[in-house]
Image (cartoon, rainbow, N blue to C red):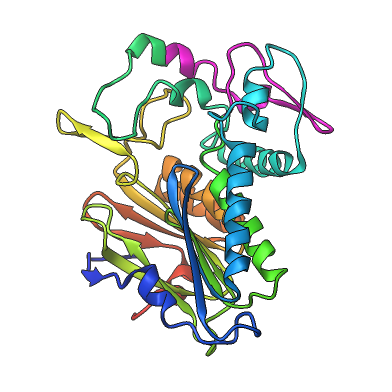
Amino acid sequence: MHHKKRRIICIGLAACSLALGVSGCKRAPRQASAVGFYFDTVVTLTAYCEQSVLDGALLECARYDALLSKTIEGSDVWRVNHAGAGRPTRVGEDMLAILALAQDVAAQSGGALDVSIGPASALWDFSGTGAALPDASALAAAAALVDYTRLRIEGDSVTLPAGMQLDLGAVAKGYIADRLAAYLQGRGVESGLINLGGNVAALGAKPGGEAWVVGIQNPQSDAGESIAAVAVCGQSVVTSGIYQRGFDLGGVRYHHILDTATGWPVQNGLAGVTIVAPSSALADALSTACFALGIQKGMALAQRYGAEAMFIDAQGQITYTPGMRALLYGQ
């Protein structure tokens, strides 16, 4: 289904948070919030509970960052990437769970999602410090190493062939959002929002029973303007788009969603894909895979997993799964 682009000013997650009532953590009548910088993004947590609960959740963020970052020496990902060809590396249950999901989505998507993208992603700099293309021959050689089927997982050990590198950026934040939700719920939080740089997980509904309204950014406009919004309860909303990390050069937008076959950014006419699913990890993985697959194949993949999807093309046209239409706010 399609409709023309609409302009909706996003009220923002912080404004949504102010609408919280007092039935989250029952012992505390006031809203608590915590902000930190982890996973190369701003983390914002909001709920009605003791401040110490959210402070503890931020400590969990630091723990997961140290565990799953490819750049932090000693992390599970770093150890696997530096173990040497054919050497098995024991990893924790968190990384094993992430890899199990990623490998499943990789198989179902024909490799559109591939956590062995590391050799190719390492040649790109989307940090905003400059606009430069990698050497084409080096990128081609790196892309030839990307092949999720060669990743071996046996028990609690992970083994990579020579040259292969893992990059969990397409799924780790979603997994962490799920774990943070479980952490908060285990401490009495019934209603709140977890925002990991646009990966949004809603705990339950608002205290009054209303759904959370999450704006979906217009990928062609400045931050703060939405092209649509969805109303969700106990679900996650994850968007992958060309605006998040990238640069413009020679009239072309080079962004962080890479074609696993070539190592170059996917150029298929899409500007953004939003996934709504109970699992933030699944929504995170699908947002990347569905973007890479394009509208038709991406929609089929999302529905195969029981998720809802919205596709925004470069002209602002929106296509969505039938179930997504019911979630659209203000329709």
Q: Is residue 253 visible?
A: no
Q: Position of residue 50 (x, y in %)?
A: 60, 74
Above or below, 113 against 90 in this view is below
The residue positioned farthest toward the right in the image shown: 155
Residue 215, quarter of picture: bottom left
The residue positioned farthest toward the left in the image shown: 250
Q: Position of residue 302 (x, y in %)?
A: 54, 54
> At 52% from the left edge and 27% from the top edge, which residue is drawn?
117
Query: Is 110 left or right of 294, judged from the image as shown?
Result: right
Query: Is 72 left or right of 101, judged from the image as shown?
Result: left
Q: Which residues are magenta?
A: 140-166
Q: Position of residue 327 (x, y in %)?
A: 45, 74
**Picture quarter with the N terminus:** bottom left
> At 73% from the left edge and 13% from the top edge, which residue is drawn?
86
Q: Position of residue 322 (x, y in %)?
A: 47, 68
Looking at this view, is 44 or 115 the one in front?
A: 44
Above or below, 148 against 325 in this view is above
Residue 283, quarter of picture: bottom right
